[in-house]
Image: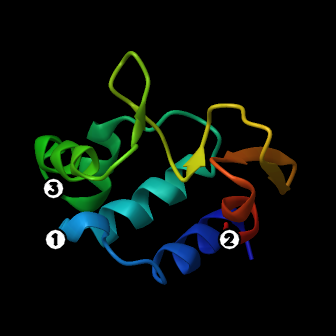
Amino acid sequence: MDQVEFAERLSQQLSAPDGAEGFAPVFIAALQELVRGRPVPVALLGRRLVLPPAMVADLLRRVKDTEWDEHGSLLGYGLTLKPTTHRFEVEGLTLHTWCAFDTLFF
């Protein structure tokens, strides 16, 4: 199973936090991009999902603790590009999580 398949499989098992209707497809696409190890522009997610970038950004901003860089690109939601002490490796790429449980979960 490659990184993208792993992210899709995992995200399909998760529900939308805080009742954010329509969050699941955004979360799936976000995880599939985050596992590539680089910040994810909202416009990229919008193109992938055929949704206005403003709608994608709104959904991501409605959930607690979403991480962003100074350019407005997604850095993390549970799985993060910010280095932490909680990390694991997939196909030679080091990925980080917010807590030890997330490392096992992802």
Q: Give SS at disc 3.
A: loop
In the image, 41: left or right of 94?
left
11 relative to 94, above or below? below
Residue 26 at x, y percent in the picture: 32, 61
> Which of the two labelled residues, at mark 2 and mark 1, occupies the earlier sequence position?
1
User: Between marks 3 and 2, how big is the CA–CA gap?
Assistant: 29 Å
Q: Residue furthest top?
A: 70
45 and 106: which is toward the camera:
106
User: Between marks 2 and 1, how big is the CA–CA gap?
Assistant: 23 Å
Q: Give SS at disc 1.
A: loop
Query: Which corner quadrant holds the C terminus?
Result: bottom right
Residue 63 at x, y percent in the picture: 29, 53
- Which quadrant of the structure image shows residue 6? bottom right
Which amino acid is tagged 3?
Leu
Disc sitting over residue 35 in the figure: none
What residue do we see at 28% from left, 49% from top? 60
Q: Which residue is mark 2?
A: 105
User: Between marks 1 and 3, how big is the CA–CA gap?
Assistant: 14 Å
Q: Which residue is mark 1?
A: 21
98 and 23: which is toward the camera:
98
Which of pointers 1 and 3 indicates the residue nearer the eye? 1
Disc sitting over residue 51 in the figure: 3
80 relative to 30, above or below? above
> Which of the two labelled residues, at mark 1 and mark 3, occupies the earlier sequence position?
1
> Which of the two labelled residues, at mark 3 and mark 2, occupies the earlier sequence position?
3
104 and 12: which is toward the camera:
104
What residue do we see at 84% from left, 56% from top? 91
Which of pointers 3 and 2 indicates the residue nearer the eye? 2
Which amino acid is tagged 2?
Phe
In the image, 105: left or right of 25?
right
Residue 16 at x, y percent in the picture: 31, 71
